[in-house]
Image (cartoon, helix red, strand yellow):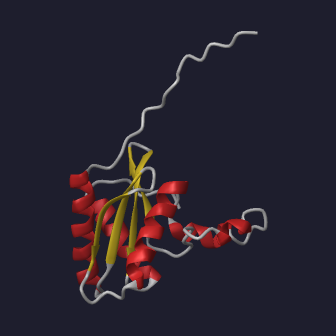
């Protein structure tokens, strides 16, 4: 039996370098208004680092947390705060052992026309502050917020 596969590749879009840098700047501006300093990571749709910044006085651990938030959001096309509920499901809970899965608010998929083109991770404030700065940056630059 012969099977012909019509499509052998899939088109993949990625956040641009310019947009990644603009997101970092927008998050830092929002964090300043909110009252905290942050580490900000932007990844492409495959979770690879595209842009990064850590404020001088942001704790060093915020760098790794921001990157893992961006990676988690890009990997699963879901905000990281959603993972708190997901991980209570015993069928999904084993993923909590993955060293990069970050179930703390502040990570968002970067969405354009309904497609995930990257991930944004913010760390340095409370999870609410991180989420607020990320959401403000995404909406300011015209990216879609994922359905909650």
Question: Does residue 92 appear left or right of residue 68 in this picture?
Answer: right
Relative vertical location of residue 10 with respect to residue 39 in this rendering, above or below: above
- Between 52 and 19, the one lying in front of the other is 52
Residue at the far top in the pictured view: 1
The quarter holding residue 85 reads bottom right
Q: Establish if 97 lies above or below 78.
A: below
Residue in view at x 27 percent, y 49 percent: 16
**Residue 77 visible to an observer of this rendering:** no
Quadrant of the drawing holding the N terminus: top right
Where is residue 57? Give x, y as percent. Answer: 27, 90
Q: Position of residue 44 (x, y in %)?
A: 38, 52
Which residue is at 40% across, 56% downward?
48
Q: Quadrant of residue 139?
A: bottom left
Q: Residue at x 47, y 56 (%)?
A: 74
> Does the image show residue 94?
yes
Identify which residue, 122 or 8, lies in the foreground: 8
Q: Is residue 103 left or right of residue 135?
A: right
Rendered location of residue 118, percent (x, y): 40, 53
Kindly indicate the quadrant of the structure image that contains residue 63. Answer: bottom left
Residue 84 drawn at (x, y percent) = 62, 73
Q: How many marks?
A: 0
45 left or right, relative to 34: right
- Above or below for 109 versus 86: above
- Which residue is depicted at the point 38% across and 58% down? 43
Whether residue 37 sits left or right of residue 71 in the image: it is left
């Amino acid at each position: 039996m012969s099977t012909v596969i019509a499509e052998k590749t899939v088109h993949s879009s990625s956040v641009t370098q310019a947009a990644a840098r603009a997101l970092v700047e927008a998050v830092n501006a929002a964090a300043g208004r909110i009252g905290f300093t942050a580490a900000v990571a932007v990844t492409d749709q495959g979770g690879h680092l595209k842009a990064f910044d850590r404020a001088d006085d942001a704790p060093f651990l915020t760098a790794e947390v921001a990157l893992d938030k961006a990676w988690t959001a890009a990997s699963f096309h879901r905000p990281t705060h959603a993972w708190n509920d997901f991980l209570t499901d015993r069928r999904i809970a084993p993923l909590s052992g993955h060293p990069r899965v970050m179930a703390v608010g502040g990570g968002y998929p970067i969405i354009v026309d309904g497609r995930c083109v990257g991930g944004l991770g913010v760390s340095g404030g409370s999870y609410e502050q991180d989420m607020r700065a990320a959401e403000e940056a995404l909406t300011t630059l015209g990216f879609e917020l994922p359905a909650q």
